[in-house]
Amino acid sequence: MADTPTPETLGTTSGFAFEPLTILIGVLRHWKIFVLFFILSIPLGVLAAITFGTRIWEAETVMLYNPRDLGDDSVLRNPPLETQIHMVKILSNLEVVRERLQLATSLKALAAACDIYVQRKTALFFIKVKWDDAQQVAAIANTLRDVFLNHQLELLKKAAARELLALEVRFRNVTEQLKRDDQRLQEFISKNKIVDLDLEVKWNLEQLTSLELLLSNSRVDKDTLALQQANLEEKIQFLQAEAAKEKAAAAQTTGLADLNIRIERLRRAIYDDKVQRADNADLVKTELAFQRAKKLYDKGLISRADYDETHADYEKAQVNALDTEQITEWKRQLGVLEKMVIPEKESFRSEAGTMLQELQLKALSMELEAVSLAQKVSHLEQERQRVKARLGVLTDLQRHYSELMREVTARETEKMDLEKTLAKVRRIYESNTSDFTVISPAKVPLYRYKSNRKLIAMAVVFLANMIGLTILLGLELFDTTIKSAAELSQRFSLPVLGVLPHMKNADRLFPDDRDFALIEPFRIISHRLLQHVPQLGARIMIASAEKAEGKTMVAVNLAAVLGRQDKRVLVVDAQVRAQESERDLRYLISEKNRPLTGLGEYLSFQADSVQDIIWPTMLPGVECIPHVEQAVIPDLLASNRMRELLDETRQNFSTIIIDAPAANLYVDAELIAGLCDAILFVVRSRTCPASLLKKEIERLNGSGTPIIGFILNGVDNLYLNRV
């Protein structure tokens, strides 16, 4: 046998509590009721429109918003346009409008009738009013506009008056503070004799840089000269020893007078050399001073007298340090005369003495140069300290001067800003113009804006139809009977093996030797049935929850189809209670000439053998055991004789179909189910409640016999075609 659902899963529901498409089709089945609701709703809507409908008139005034430019930090800056939109309909403005026009309405209703808005991406300001009177609608729009403009102008003037008073006090305070700051600045300039501090600081910085560079070079020259003097001193000491030896050897040939003359010449040469080097050092010093004075004079920092004095010192140093052509000639002639007074003798010349004399002269020159460099370094150091001190004083003066200038400049700027702001505020205070310009006043409309009568009529019609639709939908939702195969599959975890359409003529549902209206649906059902119960001699019970659901019709049609498939089928009418069967099987029996005996006679031992109660039918391959309208004790359905009957017949028949009683009425179906191999449930559409079906399925599950599926009977064509 094919796999079937377990008992734990039978009768359970899944998904929604209802199948949406089935509900929708159920509502469509009652379209006549919906049409009735629609027809009745039309006069009802017309009546409501006449009773409650009104006519509305509309008027509109347009203004252009052109705000003054007061700056972002002004307390008089215009509020955002969105804020002004909400200020139009404040209660005080509406109260004034109501009093002026003597309107008999509430402020809330008046506010609801007014619509204030701004056209997108424009500065156009609209006041639109809707009212039930053509004359008053224009008056309301124009009056509300005038009240709003007057109120805005009053608020602006009050704010301007307060701002003007505060600005005047502040302007006086700033003016007095500016006078005090300017006086302090002038006193500082006069006291420190300031002309141009920035330029003077710049010159001193340049001079300090030059002095530091000269001082560094002079110190390097001084250190280098000291190293040269030390090296020269060593060489002089060596040559003195050598010259002493040579002089001792030549002392005998040299006269005392010649030696004195030579000594005197040497001293004079040394003196002349020292004087010459000192003059050269003074020349360098005065030249630097003259160059510095020339720069300061060009920049206007020293007077003409100071410049001329420095120039004279420089020219004097040039006279002392530089020989003229005449003095040079005199020195040459003096040298010639000195050689004539004491001629040099080749035999008395000493080589060591000559070298010693040259080195001593060179040492003397270095000594003079060292003295000159020392004086130069000392002078440059003093000048550097003096310039640094002056620069420090100038920096302090510059900082103090800048602070005073900043204070004065800030006060002047603040004063000018206050003057401009005062002028703006004063113009606003004295002006009677608004930021809004009226472009178009509201006029009395010639035609009404709209009437809500049509809307009311449509709303009533729509509401009435929605009520009707809701009622139909509620009826469908509260109708718990099974309506379609989709709903049956959704509510229960069992397959639907077949769907049978609703037919007005019930007699055509049962097959005979001439007519077989449902042959195609039952061919499909039989094919699916054999897939679930493929064994020979299978005992299949046809059950239903209630009476008249079509299980006898299903049993007969199923037997007829199986008989056409070369199977030997036995149909057993197990409805042993009197007058329970919706239609018995006797109409199928082909032998009409002998008394009938059936299941009741066999179970009550009125018939001896099974063959006595099996009757041939007009359907090929089908035989039946009928019920002959005599009540039998239902307990016999679970007796050994019933079991023997089924065991004997399964040896001779391919399929045994048992037409069982309704499960809801008696226990008969449960007694028979224990003797069967499978149960097939027949459900009539829109007849069997889902709760009852679930209950009976759970009852039959207790027998242990599997329920293989459903056959849905009497399905409406709408469900049959769409579900």
Image (cartoon, helix red, strand yellow):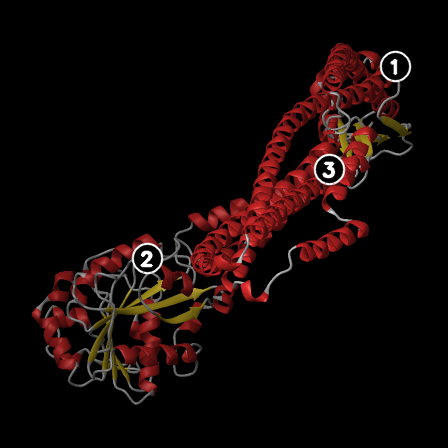
- Residue 434 percent across, percent down from the top left: 85, 22
The label on residue 458 is none
Q: Quadrant of residue 349?
A: bottom right
Q: Quadrant of residue 626?
A: bottom left
Three-letter residue code for mark 1: Glu
Residue hosting label 1? 430
Secondary structure at badge 1 equals helix
Viewer-proximal residue among 218 and 721: 218
- Residue 278 percent across, percent down from the top left: 64, 42
Residue hosting label 2? 13
Viewer-proximal residue among 320 and 292: 320
Residue hosting label 3? 46
The quarter in which the N terminus is drawn is bottom left
Nearer the viewer's eye, disc 1 or disc 2? 1
Decide if residue 604 is in sight here. yes
Secondary structure at badge 3 equals helix
Q: Is residue 160 above or below residue 395?
A: above
Three-letter residue code for mark 3: Val
Going 53% across and 53% down the picture, which residue do you hit? 360
Question: Which tag, 1 or 2, sits closer to the chain's start?
Answer: 2
Q: Is residue 560 above or below residue 59?
A: below
Mark 2, residues whose alpha carbon is within 10 Å: few (<14), some, or many (≥20)? some
Mark 1, residues whose alpha carbon is within 10 Å: few (<14), some, or many (≥20)? few
